[in-house]
Amino acid sequence: MIIAIVVVFITTIYVSLILAFFVGLKRVLSENNEHVGEVVKLSIIVAFKDEEANLPVLLYALSNQTLSQDYFEVILVDDHSADNSLAVANGYRSRIKNLRIVEIPINFIGKKAALTLGISLASNPLIAFTDADCIPTEYWLESISRIASNSSVLIIGAVVMSPINSFARKLQSLEYASLMASAAGSCGIGHPIMASSANLAFRNDLLKVDAGSMSPTVSSGDDMFLLHKAKKLKDCRVKFMTDVRSIVQTSTESTIAKALNQRKRWASKSVYYKDFDTIFTGLVVLIFNLMLILLFFASIVDFIYLFYFLILLVLKSFVDYLLINRYLKFTSQDKLLRIFLPLQLMYPFYVVYSFFAGIIVKANWKGRAIN
């Protein structure tokens, strides 16, 4: 009886949470973010390390923005690259009017140090982040600039993962879409839980980011710590961009193993979070999926647990489908629904393993251990 009560309690919380995100997502997507205000000048900051293969694609995209180059500057900050990244960046000086390329001092290291330096050099209060391996649309900066005039402190943009030319890549893309759907939905109910530095902007005159704003002792998580800082401000406005022209594309990993390592990096920073909404959501998702795994293995001993497992899996799949289907229509990724069921079967193991492995074992990023 006690087990049944616990199972019903946890399931109710999980289902209620996802349904709340679904309502929030519908609310967000019903808003019209296109051309909502006047153009605001902005500074784009990109921290990079050993990105000579990716920088040409990003810089080409930034040089072909619909927003006039008189309205933005690009600040590239090199984190001690050992390849030809600097030479590639310098090759775009003639194509991007306001391009600044700087190197972080020898006694500093890491993405957060690079971003902090870039912010200190920015000429404009509106700052946008993206990563060196990302591809923004040509309307990206114009969308951010106009939405920012609506007095938003922090603006979260949609990110899609590609290519999706293999089963492993499709799984990653669908799983990430579920995270972005939750990010959008949580914004819609006024309790944002996630942001991505691949597509993120903020008003630094209001947020006042400094060296301590992104928890510099933690090697990753600049985006999440900025979100948490913004939420502490009185009357904070966190906006999710629903202009489809503002979507940024980032790369999938070639194998599930690499995707798991990426997931472990994300999980490793979660123990440093202090934001209630993020912690609560993470715990609910973790506990519910852990419960599914325990029920699955308990069915080996008693067949009744298999019945519980299947009932919960159906409930989970139903509410998850509502949320992710709505989001995939927004991003034009409907084809990913073909692997929705395989992801549902794998996801509990994927989430639980990534969380505990990320906390116990230090994940690596570009040869560096994540604290």
Image: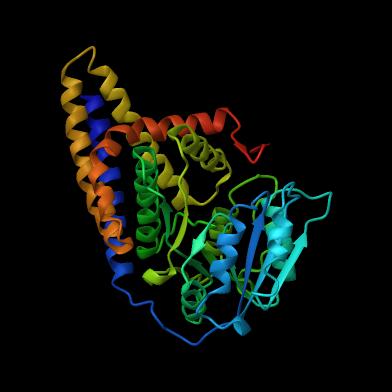
What quarter of the picture does the N terminus occupy? top left
Q: Quadrant of residue 360?
A: top right
**Image position of 185 (left or right of 133):** left
- How was this image coloured? rainbow
Q: Nearer the viewer, residue 204 or 124?
A: 124
**Image position of 196 (left or right of 362):** left
Q: Does residue 321 sit above or below 134 in this rendering? A: above
Residue 361 drawn at (x, y percent): 58, 28
- How many numbered circles does the render carry? 0
Residue 138 drawn at (x, y percent): 48, 72
Q: Does residue 65 sit above or below 24 in this rendering? A: below
Q: Nearer the viewer, residue 306 or 66?
A: 66
**Image position of 60 (left or right of 291):** right
Q: Does residue 230 sit above or below 36 in this rendering? A: above
- The answer to whether residue 19 is visible is no
Q: Residue at x 39, y 55 (%)?
A: 180
Residue 286 drawn at (x, y percent): 39, 36
Q: Residue furthest bottom?
A: 38
Q: Residue at x 84, y 49 (%)?
A: 107
Q: Residue at x 29, y 30 (%)?
A: 292
Q: Nearer the viewer, residue 255 or 202?
A: 255
Q: Residue at x 37, y 30 (%)?
A: 349
